[in-house]
Image (cartoon, rainbow, N blue to C red):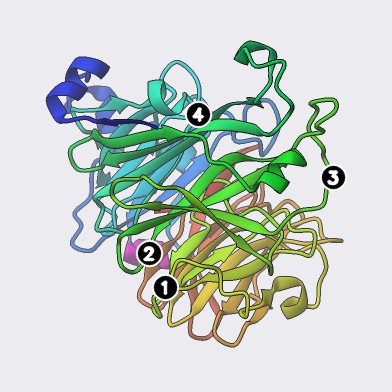
Amino acid sequence: MKKQLLNFLTLGALLGIVALSSCSDDNEGNPTNPPAEQEDRWITVAGALMGENPGDGNGGTKVYSVSIEEAKNPETQISAYSDGFGVKSNRTARLQSSEDGSTLFNIAYTGDNGGEFSRYAVNGRGGFTQSDVSVNISQYAGTSPRWLKLFDGDKTGVALNIANIQANNAPDTGNESDPFAYYRGTATILALDLQESLIRNYVQYPIPLSEEEEAAGHTIFRLDGSVLNAAGNKLIIGTWMRKYNVETGQTEGAYERLGTKSVVVDYPSLENPTVINSSVGHGDNSGYRSHFSYLGDDDNIYQATERDPNGSHILRINQNNEYDNSYVFSLNDALGLTGVTIEAWKYAQGGKAFALISHDGAENGFVVWMDLNSRTASIVDLPYDPDLEFNQYQGFVADGADVYITVTPVGKNGNIYILDSNTGEATKGATLLNEPGNHYIGIF
């Protein structure tokens, strides 16, 4: 195992922390939209610009903030694209926000600045001020790291990567004469201090599966979706699995899945990785660009699956950090549909949650209200459009029983909606002005 602890001075020497002026034009956002007075938290919406194809989100990300009162008012009109601030990212930014909405955290995704972590103070409208300290984690976690903020009072972000997946007897290992035993990559788990903008800790090691699973070509392809347990001493990390044909070395698109797996490591050391396995779900649980696991009010962890041959499930991990296979919550069964896929979801309170889904036979996405205790679900009454997609959705804001989301079809205007987690009812909020090929991907 390779492990490194970095303090601030070492980080400055190794990574060349760049001081950025907090009063430059680039940091103050659009000067035609001066910061507004604000006593409550800001609500920041994020819009993804198209690259080559409508809805691909590969043209960068712009953000714009309003007050809660403005966010709730359908008469408010927001155009992040004409009035907003462009956060650093070659493609879609991976954004997180502080619990009070006063700060945005970002790690640039791909490109020359891929892997660069930045903090932005939210000043209102298009005004965002970048902190004078940034740090680039690309030499540890690559230029396209997956990362999320832990729910620990805005202290820590966790970035994850798996690199160099190959067989134990691959030609460049020097072990070509050995019999095949496994495909493995090197995992990186990196803890970021969000307040000091420095790397607090990182580890690198392979994460083996069982001998039988590895002999058949199964391996962990991606890590993401980390969450702390109730005790705060274990980090549970989601996985995206892959299977190789052991004869040809090619990846297999269709194969028998062996349950849903999570990696559990000690926290804060990030050591002693173990793999736990669900016999209820058979999909991946890494998520795409948002949290896929949440600590519930009952101190159990609730986790969504995707790419599940039996449709998405909500799984439960108990306080012993093991899957509770007696808890069965199938979205296919609860909704009476097939091929349900959870694209993103948010735990609210009291076992209530909302999910953004797609399903067989439907062109567009839907919003679903879920009761994790009764294991029931229903589609929220909203104006659904054939061009509404949630596959790139990132951010939700939970404010008591209310959950704020953005709902915009690609290239069309939409709205902020405030979802009541006690009733499942939706209230229309501010109007989101769109542009051709673009769509709003979250709220922070």
Q: Is residue 393 visible?
A: no
Q: Which mark is residue 144?
A: 4
Of badges 4 and 3, the one in the foreground is: 3
Q: How far is mark 4 from mark 3, CA to CA? A: 26 Å
Compared with residue 333, is residue 275 higher up or lower down, i.e. above or below? above
Give the SS element for disc 1. Answer: loop
Residue beneath the point at 65% across and 25% down = 168
Task: Measuring from the top left, give residue 345's x and y in whole percent.
Answer: 55, 62
Query: What amino acid type should be assigned to the residue bearing mark 3?
Result: Ala
Q: How far is mark 2 from mark 4, CA to CA? A: 26 Å
Category of crowding for the residue at label 4, using alpha-carbon neighbours closer than 10 angstroms: few (below 14), some (14–19), many (at least 20): many
Q: Which residue is mark 2?
A: 229
Camera-side residue of 255 and 194 = 255
Q: How far is mark 3 from mark 1, CA to CA? A: 34 Å
The N terminus lies in quadrant? top left
Query: What amino acid type should be assigned to the residue bearing mark 1?
Result: Gln
Query: What amino acid type should be assigned to the residue bearing mark 2?
Result: Asn
The magenta segment: 68-73
Q: Earlier in the sequence, mark 2 or mark 1?
A: 2
Q: How far is mark 4 from mark 1, CA to CA? A: 32 Å
Q: Earlier in the sequence, mark 4 or mark 1?
A: 4
Task: Measuring from the top left, give residue 270's x and y in whole percent.
Answer: 35, 45
Residue beneath the point at 82% across and 52% down = 256
Residues at circles 4 and 3 in contact by the CB criterion of under 8 Å: no
Of badges 4 and 1, the one in the foreground is: 1
Give the SS element for disc 3. Answer: loop
Compared with residue 182, is residue 168 higher up or lower down, i.e. above or below? above
Examine the image and state in which quarter residue 185 appears.
top right
